[in-house]
Image (cartoon, rainbow, N blue to C red):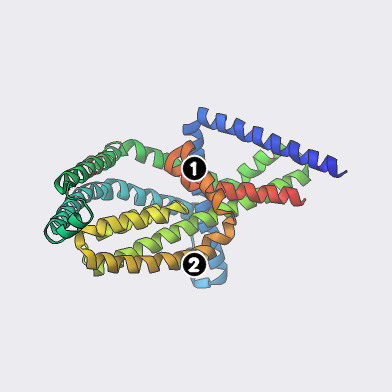
Amino acid sequence: MITNINTNKIINIILISILILIIYRFFLFFQDIITLVIFVIFFSFIIKSIIESIENLKKKYPFIRKILNFSNDFIIFILISFFIFLITIIILILTPTIYSSLRDIASNITDFIKSILILINNYFVFLKINLGLENINLDEIYKNIINEINNYIPNLANLLLNFVVNSTTIIGKIILVGILTFYFVKDYNKILDFYLKLFTKNQEQVEKLKEIINIIEHTISKFIIGQFFAATYIFFFIFIILSLLKVKNGFIIALIAGIFELIPFIGAFIGFFLSTIFIIPLGLEKIIIFIIYITIIYQLLAKLIYPNFVGKILDISVITVLLSLLIGYKLAGIIGMFISIPIASIIKKIIIKNYNT
């Protein structure tokens, strides 16, 4: 009996592996369409979650019901229009600002490195002598560093510029996602019932599938809301710190840190590193103050906020997170990294649910 159970488990694992391989090949062939569908589904779950929250508030507070006395279709339309407007503003206004800011930051960093090397030459010559480093050419090192910065920053800036140039196509796709999302959320229950009936006529199987879909809905919506909350938190507090330190490009630096925070796990490290690099030209004192404050902010996020908003929902190990990020990046770049974590969590929950039953 035990042997049969183990054999069935092995067969199930093999079948799941084959299914994953088939899905991977299918994804590569229809990558653009599948990416669009994934965007629509993720965006739909956000809108659906907000609508449900509004409905709960209407039931709890009569004055909110009076203020938001509109049909769900109208609220869905307003929410989607707001998101499209917000993303369009970010693309058309903030991206060129980031472009010019990156060039300013590059110039400041090169000046800072030059001053550090002059300081080393003037006041720390004895270190070179005592350590036997007389043959090191600091001017050559400086030129190499500056060349690397001058190569990297324009490439990044040109990437952003191309992004703006192609913004018409991008905005068109965003509008398409918005339209599809509207009809998907509007007719969600009808679409769900149709495909469930198409898949099976057995009512028991339908109920099981609905449970799985509820798991997917709950995980994705809570994860996305949690990530956006974390990103907003990082943006807000880093912007305040940079404003207090009177940093010129504070808004842009905070925005970049907030955007990278959307990427689970490694986004915080990237945001922390980039933010600190942008502060380098301001001098050692401000660097130390900034690092102390930003460390406290990230620790609060990691220890108190993130576990309560996202950690309990995902419930996956660090190694699973890293593997998911690598696979997600390979399949769909930055977007793949963002969606890979909730997908990994969903797969784990479904496997555990089926294993327990």
- Could you say where residue 230 lies in the image, as x and y percent from the top left? 44, 60
Disc 2 crowd, CA 10 A, few/some/many (<14, 14-19, 20+) = few
Say if mark 2 contacts mark 1, CB within 8 Å: no
Give the side of residue 124 with respect to residue 303, left or right: left
Residue drawn at x 64%, y 49% is: 348
Residue type at the position of mark 1: Leu
| 137 or 161: nearer the viewer | 137
- Could you say where residue 75 lies in the image, as x and y percent from the top left? 47, 55
Q: Outermost residue, right direction?
A: 1
Residue drawn at x 75%, y 36% is: 11
> As displayed, is residue 298 above or below residue 15?
below
Distance of label 2 from label 1 (alpha carbons) = 25 Å
Image quarter for residue 253?
Answer: bottom left
Give the side of residue 64 with respect to residue 291, left or right: right
Q: Outermost residue, top direction?
A: 29
> As displayed, is residue 91 above or below residue 229?
above
Q: Outermost residue, left direction?
A: 122
- Could you say where residue 341 lies in the image, as x and y percent from the top left? 53, 49
Q: Under tag 1, what secondary structure?
A: helix
Q: Earlier in the sequence, mark 2 or mark 1?
A: 2
Residue ID for mark 2:
303
- Could you say where residue 306 lies in the image, as x and y percent from the top left? 49, 63
Residue drawn at x 42%, y 53% is: 267
> As displayed, is residue 248 above or below residue 107?
below
Disc 1 crowd, CA 10 A, few/some/many (<14, 14-19, 20+) = some
Give the side of residue 321 with respect to residue 353, left or right: left
Residue ID for mark 1:
326
Q: Under tag 2, what secondary structure?
A: helix
Residue type at the position of mark 2: Lys
Residue drawn at x 41%, y 64% is: 298
Image quarter for residue 279?
Answer: bottom left
